[in-house]
Amino acid sequence: MASGLKLCTSTQPLVRTLFLGIAVLLFGFLAGCSTVDSRIRGNPQTFASLSPGDQALVHQGGIREGMTRAAVYMAWGKPDRVRYGSRAGVPFEAWIYTTTRSEIVPGDYPPFSGYGYYRYGWSRPFYGRGGFYGYYPFNPYISDIVDYEVPYKSAFFERDRCTAWEYTR
């Protein structure tokens, strides 16, 4: 009985260390998430320099033409991609924000799987064939789910000012 108690007390520091490690990892993960409020707290001088209308727009996560890059960053965060180019001799920068979509892609199926034109229904192996032929519309052999990035919003800048923005539905 005493040895069992010693085992429990000797594992308590290990459990505490493990719990503390998990808590630190969870806190680090959550601290890495960027929100509008955290970006405003990180740049209070920039936020204070915005007009009251722009401050309200940033709080709602919106932008408008004429905003600075810093204001767009506070409203939308870090872009997933940045493109550079030139229009009429004026260099521009495009910030692209993406989201992930998933699609189920049917894969190869063995010819005996019953997908496509197939004899289905009941079967009498020793007394002849039963059932009927027809199209079986279900593929039970889904081989892959493909995830891919799709742009859903963009902001365009010329000379540190937002000149255009767009949402994609």
Image (spheres, rainbow, N blue to C red):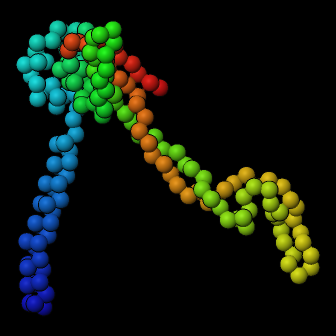
Residue 142: % across, % down: 58, 57
Which residue is painted at 11% across and 84% down in the image? 7
Q: Is residue 103 left or right of residue 31?
A: right
Which residue is painted at 16% across and 48% down in the image? 28
Q: Give the quarter of the image for residue 84.
A: top left
Residue 55: % across, % down: 19, 14
Residue 44: % across, % down: 9, 22
Which residue is painted at 92% across and 79% down in the image? 127
Question: Vertically, is 28 above or below 50?
Answer: below
Question: Vertically, is 130 above or below 126?
Answer: above
Q: Quadrant of the N terminus?
A: bottom left
Residue 131: % across, % down: 87, 65
Q: Is residue 29 left or right of residue 98?
A: left
138, 151: nearer the viewer: 151
Which residue is painted at 22% across and 9% down in the image? 53
Q: Give the quarter of the image for residue 77.
A: top left
68, 19: nearer the viewer: 68
